[in-house]
Image: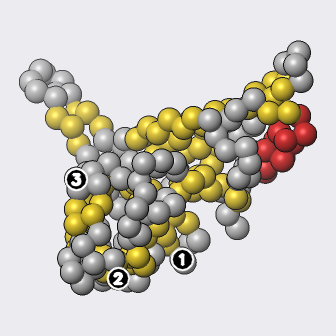
Amino acid sequence: MTLLLPSFPSPSSMTMTLVSNSIDMKPTLGGPTQRASRIGSRWQCDVNLPPMSYANAMNWMATLNRAATEIMRLFVVQPDLTGLDAGSVAVNGAGQAGTSLAVSGGTAAYSYRGGQFITLYNASLNRGYLHQLTAGYTLSGAGAGILPIYPAMRSAPLAGSILYQNAPFIDGFLTNPSASWSVDAARTVGLSFSILEAE
């Protein structure tokens, strides 16, 4: 079961970092370094919460303690992406891999923006995989297209798997297995944490 984080108070800041699984190969006897791209790159999000009263912080504290051993879900903020709804976008065809994702079922002529986050949901695992569009893309009049995404898909999605673009999320574990917090003289709680996307 995926653990949902509290909705109040919402984070004051989020820092997204792509944790690359690429490796650099340096020749022993000299020569140019080559970078090998490997499947497995994923996202990490560092989160800061606003100062809270102890009473408001208690739910966050309890939930993060549970998140030390359970997969938690954090919604990624995209504050300026408002307007036309993308519709019920889903994976169009099984066995896909790499950084191109065929989709269908979307709103006709919906325009994705370069840098926009989407979550590809795997129902069999009850887990989402966060991706970012590497370029803008407009769906066809039938609401279909091939989205340029990164990082590469880590597992082949099932045909019909849902895409979340209006409210993308990251599923993962705390990078530090033990959550911590502080209480200052004004009796407000300061809380921050990092989530790394699960394998």
Q: Amino acid at mark 3?
A: Ala
Secondary-structure class at tag 2: strand
Q: Nearer the viewer, mark 2 or mark 1?
A: 2
Residue indicated by mark 1: 123
Q: Are marks 3 and 1 in contact (CB under 8 Å)?
A: no
Residue count near mark 3 (Cα–Cα under 10 Å), binned few <14, some 14–19, many ≥20: few
The quadrant holding residue 22 is top left
In this view, the residue farthest toward the left is: 31
The quadrant holding residue 18 is top left
Q: Is residue 1 above or below residue 35?
A: below
Residue 159 place in picture, x, y as percent:
38, 83
**Quarter containing the N terminus:** bottom right
Q: Is residue 8 above or below residue 51?
A: below
Residue 54 place in picture, x, y as percent:
88, 34
Residue indicated by mark 3: 135
Q: Amino acid at mark 1?
A: Ala
First along the sequence among labels 3 and 2: 2
Q: Amino acid at mark 2?
A: Gly
Q: Nearer the viewer, mark 3 or mark 1?
A: 3
Residue count near mark 1 (Cα–Cα under 10 Å), binned few <14, some 14–19, many ≥20: few
The quadrant holding residue 21 is top left
Residue indicated by mark 2: 105
Q: CA distance from mark 3 to mark 2?
A: 20 Å
Residue count near mark 2 (Cα–Cα under 10 Å), binned few <14, some 14–19, many ≥20: some
Residue 109 place in picture, x, y as percent:
24, 73
Identify the residue at image location x=32%, y=48%. Answer: 115
